[in-house]
Image: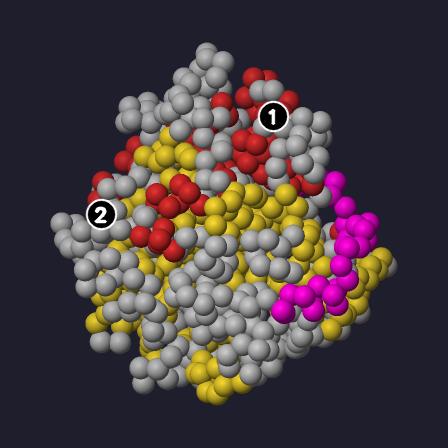
C-alpha cells in the first residue's frame, strides 16, 4: 500500500486501493447464533491434532503439538529491543548486521547497464531490471544440480513481488500528464514493466548473499507477460476479452503484494489492489446490466484509473494501454472486441514456476477472485488435502480457505506447475465466520449451497465460475464476518495454528464493533480522537480437525496493536510496553523454528516511530482470557466481549528493527539454516515532491549508495545476519515435553 493510499484510508475517503464498500447486510456477532460447539470443547479438540510440516520446510513430519509428541525445543529471543525512532536509517538490534541485496532498477542480467536512477533509464531496460516496491518473497533452495531442494541454504532462487511504483522517481520530471491524460507511452510502459515479479538466483557470500547476474533463471514477470487462465472459471463468458476471445488467457499481473508457495517448488504471487488500475467512467453505466453494476460497485471498479494508463493514445503497441479501459467501446455482445471484461482477469492467485524460465504463469481461479493479500499454505501431509489461507485486503472484508480435492502425493513434488493443475484447479473455497463465543465456522462458497444460487440477492449467481469470479459477493451471501482489513497470514509450524494480521480499519463504526473486531477508539475520558480500529490487531485460530477437513475452529486475538501509553482496559489490551508497542501489523511470517516475525505498515504512529519488524514467541489459542472492551462516541457507549491472548512480555515480544522514513517494512524469507533473513524496505521517501532530492526531503535513505549525493531513494531487499553467525532472532535453548 502506498503512503497516499494510507492517508486516504485514514481520512476515510473512497480510494481505489482498499476502501471499496462492503454493502452486504451480514449480521454482527450479537445477532449470530452460537456455534454448535462451545469455546471450551473446540479448544479441547483442537490441541489433540499433531501439527505437521509447513510448506517451505521439510516435507516430512515436523514439530508436534500434542503432549505425547517428541520434545519441543524452547525459544529464547537473542537480542535487546530496538527503541522506537524516526531516523532516516535502518536501526537494527545490536549484534546483527544488514547488507543490500537488490534495489529498484538493479540489473538482473549481465547485459543490463547499471541503473542511472535519475529517470533516464529506458522502459525496455526494465525487462532486465528489478521492479519497484519490493514486497512478498520466497527462498527456493537450489542444489548443485540446479534443482529445487528446500533444505539447501547456500544457493537459491529468490522470487520477489513488486507491488506498486513511486512514479515521481521513475521519470526525469515525474509522470507527464496533460489535461488528465498520459502523453508519453514510454513513461507508461516503464511503469507497467516496473510492476510484477523478479526471479533472481542468489549465492551465499560469507554470511550474506549476492545476486548472480548471469543466471539462466533470472527473469521478470510483468504486466505485459502472457498468462494462462486455469481452473473452474476459465472459458467463462465473463473472461472474454479482445486479447483472448476464449477467456483462457490474459496479459500480465498487477498489484502483487504478498505471496505463497507450493510443495512442488512453485511461487504464488497474489493480485491485491488491482481494481484501481482500470478506467471506467460514469457514462459506461448505461451500457451495463444490473448484475454488472452490482459487481463493479462491490469490487470498486470505477474512476479514472490510478495511473491513467488507459489514456495513452493511440494504442499501437499490442494491447498495452487500451486494455486498462474497462468500458464498453466495441460493438460485440460478448466483449471480444474490447476490454470490458478485463477486470475479471485480475484479482487471482498466480502460479509461477521459477525453475522453468520459459514457462507462462497460470492464474488459478479455483482460489477465488478478490483483493488477494497472499496465499499461505497449511501443513503438508501425505494422503491429506492441501490447504491455503487467504485474506482480502480491504476494509470489512473476509478471510478465506482453499482446500484441494486431490490428496497430497509426495511424488508430485517434482512435477512443477503440472502439479498445480492437479491441486490448484480443483478444490473447495470457504470463507470464515467468527462467532461471538470464540468459535468459528468455515462456510462453503459453492453454487447451489448456503444460498449461493440464482435466487441470491442482490447478486444472482449463474454457476460456479460466477461464484469464483465474484467471491466477495458469494461471501456476502453466506454471512461471513467482516474483518478489519485482513492482511498477511502464517501457519505456526509447531502447532498448526493460523495467524492473520488485521492491519487497521478507520471506518469501523461504534455500532459495528464485534467480538473479533472489538475496538473503536474514541474515549472522551482519555482524550482519544481516533475513530475506528486505528492500530489493528492479529487474530489466530486453531482448526478443530485436520486443516483440510475442519469446518469449525476456535479463535482469539494474539495481539492488539496500540501505543504503550494507551488505556490498558480498552485499547492497549495486550499490555504492550515501549520496547514492543507497534501499530498497523501487516507482514507476518513464521521461521521454521516457530519464531513469529511481525512487520508494520503504519500512518497512525508515525509521529513516534517509523515502520518496524518485531519478533514474537507465540503461545496457543486460549492462553489468555476473555475481556469486555468498552467503546465510546460522545455520549454513546458500546461494550463487547472478546478473547485476548496472553499479555505480551519482554521475553515474548521485542522490536528487532526500525526502518527509514516514509517506508513500509514488508516481505520476509529465510535461508533454511535460519542464519539469513531477507526483508524488504518498500517506498522510502515516497512522499518526496518534485525532482530535486535534498536532505530536507522525507527520506534520502541509501542516497550515498552507490551514487552518492542526493540520489533518489529506492525500495530494496536487505539480508540480515547475526554477527556471530548464529540463528536470527531466537535461539533454541532447551527441550520440554
Residue 657: x, y in percent? 44, 73
Q: Is residue 605 above or below residue 332?
A: below
Residue 113 visible somewhere in the drawing: no
SS for tag 2?
loop
> Which element is circle 1 on?
loop
Report crowding for label 2: few under 14, some 14 to 19, many 20 or more residues within 10 A (C-alpha): many
Q: What mark, if any, has residue 735 been given in the picture?
A: none
- Magenta stretch contains residue 44: yes
Q: Earlier in the sequence, mark 1 or mark 2?
A: 2
Residue most extreme to the left: 111
Q: Nearer the viewer, residue 604 or 511?
A: 511
Query: What are the residue bounds of the magenta stretch?
Result: 22-48
Q: Looking at the image, which residue is at 50% across and 47% down?
A: 404
Q: Are marks 1 and 2 in contact (CB under 8 Å)?
A: no
Answer whether residue 480 is visible to the viewer in this image. yes
Q: Which residue is mark 2?
A: 128
The residue identified by callout 1 is 462
Which residue is most to the right?
A: 635
Residue at image position (56%, 17%) is 287
Disc 1 and disc 2: Cα gap in Å?
43 Å
Q: Quadrant of residue 617?
A: bottom right
Q: At which x and y percent is residue 349?
A: 45, 44
Disc 1: CA contacts within 10 A as few (<14), some (14-19) or many (>=20): some
Tell whether 236 sits left or right of 46: left
Where is residue 354 drawn, in percent x and y? 29, 50
Residue 656 vs residue 694: left or right? Answer: right
Q: Is residue 214 above or below residue 705?
A: above
Q: Residue at left 35%, top 36%?
A: 227
Q: Residue furthest bottom?
A: 734
Q: Which is more toward the observer, 679 or 304?
A: 679
Q: Farthest top residue?
A: 331
Q: Is residue 557 left or right of residue 192?
A: right
Amino acid at each position: 500500500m502506498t503512503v497516499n493510499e494510507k492517508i486516504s484510508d485514514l481520512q476515510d475517503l473512497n480510494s481505489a486501493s482498499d476502501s471499496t464498500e462492503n454493502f452486504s447486510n451480514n449480521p454482527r456477532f450479537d445477532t449470530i447464533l452460537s456455534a454448535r460447539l462451545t469455546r471450551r470443547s473446540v479448544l479441547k479438540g483442537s490441541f489433540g491434532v499433531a501439527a505437521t510440516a509447513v510448506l517451505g520446510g521439510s516435507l516430512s513430519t515436523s514439530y508436534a503439538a500434542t503432549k505425547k509428541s517428541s520434545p519441543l525445543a524452547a525459544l529464547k529471543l537473542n537480542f535487546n529491543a530496538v527503541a522506537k525512532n524516526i531516523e532516516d536509517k535502518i536501526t537494527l538490534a545490536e549484534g546483527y548486521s544488514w547488507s543490500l541485496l537488490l534495489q529498484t532498477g538493479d540489473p538482473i542480467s549481465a547485459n543490463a547497464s547499471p541503473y542511472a536512477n535519475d529517470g533516464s533509464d529506458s522502459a525496455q531496460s526494465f525487462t532486465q531490471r528489478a521492479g519497484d516496491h519490493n514486497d512478498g518473497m520466497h527462498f527456493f533452495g537450489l542444489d548443485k544440480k540446479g534443482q529445487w531442494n528446500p533444505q539447501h541454504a547456500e544457493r537459491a532462487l529468490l522470487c520477489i513481488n513488486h507491488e506498486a511504483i513511486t512514479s515521481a522517481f521513475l521519470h526525469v520530471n515525474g509522470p507527464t500528464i496533460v489535461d488528465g491524460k498520459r502523453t508519453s507511452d514510454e513513461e507508461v510502459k516503464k511503469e507497467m514493466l516496473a510492476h510484477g515479479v523478479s526471479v533472481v538466483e542468489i549465492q551465499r557470500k560469507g554470511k550474506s548473499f549476492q545476486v548472480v547476474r548471469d543466471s539462466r533463471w533470472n527473469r521478470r514477470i510483468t504486466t505485459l507477460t502472457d498468462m494462462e487462465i486455469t481452473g473452474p472459471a476459465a472459458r467463462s463468458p465473463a473472461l472474454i476479452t479482445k486479447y483472448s476471445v476464449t477467456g483462457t488467457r490474459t496479459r500480465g499481473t498487477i498489484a502483487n503484494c504478498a505471496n505463497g508457495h507450493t510443495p512442488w517448488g512453485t511461487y504464488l504471487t497474489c493480485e491485491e489492489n488491482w481494481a484501481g488500475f482500470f478506467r471506467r467512467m460514469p457514462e459506461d453505466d448505461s451500457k451495463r446490466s444490473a448484475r454488472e453494476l452490482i459487481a463493479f460497485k462491490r469490487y470498486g471498479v470505477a474512476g479514472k484509473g490510478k495511473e491513467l494508463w488507459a489514456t495513452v493514445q493511440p494504442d499501437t503497441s499490442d494491447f498495452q494501454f487500451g486494455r486498462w479501459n474497462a468500458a464498453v467501446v466495441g460493438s460485440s455482445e460478448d466483449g471480444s472486441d474490447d476490454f470490458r471484461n478485463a477486470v475479471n482477469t485480475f484479482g487471482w492467485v498466480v502460479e509461477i514456476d521459477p525453475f522453468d524460465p520459459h514457462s507462462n504463469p497460470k492464474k488459478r481461479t479455483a482460489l477465488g477472485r478478490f483483493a488477494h493479500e497472499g496465499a499461505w499454505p497449511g501443513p503438508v501431509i501425505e494422503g491429506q488435502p492441501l490447504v491455503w489461507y487467504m485474506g482480502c485486503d480491504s476494509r470489512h472484508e473476509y478471510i478465506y480457505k482453499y482446500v484441494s480435492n486431490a490428496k497430497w502425493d509426495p511424488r508430485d513434488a517434482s512435477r512443477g506447475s503440472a502439479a498445480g493443475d492437479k491441486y490448484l484447479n480443483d478444490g473447495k473455497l470457504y470463507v470464515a465466520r467468527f462467532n461471538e463465543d470464540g468459535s468459528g465456522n468455515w462456510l462453503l462458497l459453492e453454487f447451489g449451497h448456503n444460498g449461493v444460487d440464482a435466487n441470491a440477492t442482490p447478486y444472482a449467481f449463474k454457476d460456479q465460475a460466477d461464484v469464483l469470479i465474484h467471491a466477495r459477493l458469494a461471501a456476502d451471501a453466506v454471512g461471513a464476518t467482516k474483518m478489519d482489513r485482513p492482511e498477511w497470514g502464517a501457519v505456526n509450524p509447531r502447532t498448526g495454528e493460523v495467524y492473520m494480521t488485521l492491519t487497521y480499519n478507520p471506518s469501523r463504526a461504534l455500532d459495528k464493533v464485534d467480538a473479533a473486531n472489538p475496538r473503536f477508539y474514541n474515549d472522551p475520558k482519555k482524550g482519544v480522537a481516533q475513530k475506528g480500529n486505528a492500530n489493528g490487531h492479529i487474530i489466530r485460530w486453531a482448526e478443530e480437525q485436520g486443516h483440510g477437513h475442519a469446518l469449525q475452529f476456535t479463535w482469539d486475538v494474539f495481539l492488539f496493536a496500540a501505543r504503550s501509553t494507551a488505556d490498558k482496559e480498552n485499547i492497549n489490551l495486550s499490555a504492550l510496553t515501549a520496547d514492543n508497542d507497534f501499530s498497523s501489523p501487516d507482514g507476518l511470517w513464521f521461521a521454521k523454528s516457530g519464531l513469529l516475525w511481525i512487520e508494520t505498515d503504519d500512518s497512525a504512529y508515525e509521529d513516534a516511530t517509523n515502520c518496524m519488524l518485531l519478533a514474537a514467541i507465540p503461545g496457543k489459542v486460549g492462553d489468555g482470557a476473555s475481556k469486555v472492551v468498552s467503546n465510546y462516541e460522545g455520549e454513546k457507549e458500546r461494550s463487547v466481549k472478546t478473547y485476548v491472548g496472553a499479555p505480551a512480555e519482554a521475553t515474548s515480544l521485542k522490536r528487532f528493527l526500525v526502518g527509514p522514513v516514509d517506508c513500509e517494512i514488508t516481505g520476509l524469507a529465510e535461508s533454511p539454516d535460519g542464519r539469513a533473513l531477507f526483508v524488504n524496505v518498500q517506498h522510502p521517501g515516497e512522499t518526496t515532491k518534485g525532482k530535486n532530492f535534498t536532505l530536507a526531503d522525507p527520506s534520502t535513505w541509501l542516497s550515498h549508495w552507490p551514487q552518492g549525493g542526493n540520489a533518489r531513494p529506492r525500495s530494496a531487499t536487505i539480508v540480515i545476519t547475526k554477527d556471530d553467525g548464529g540463528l536470527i532472532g531466537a535461539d533454541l535453548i532447551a527441550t520440554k515435553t
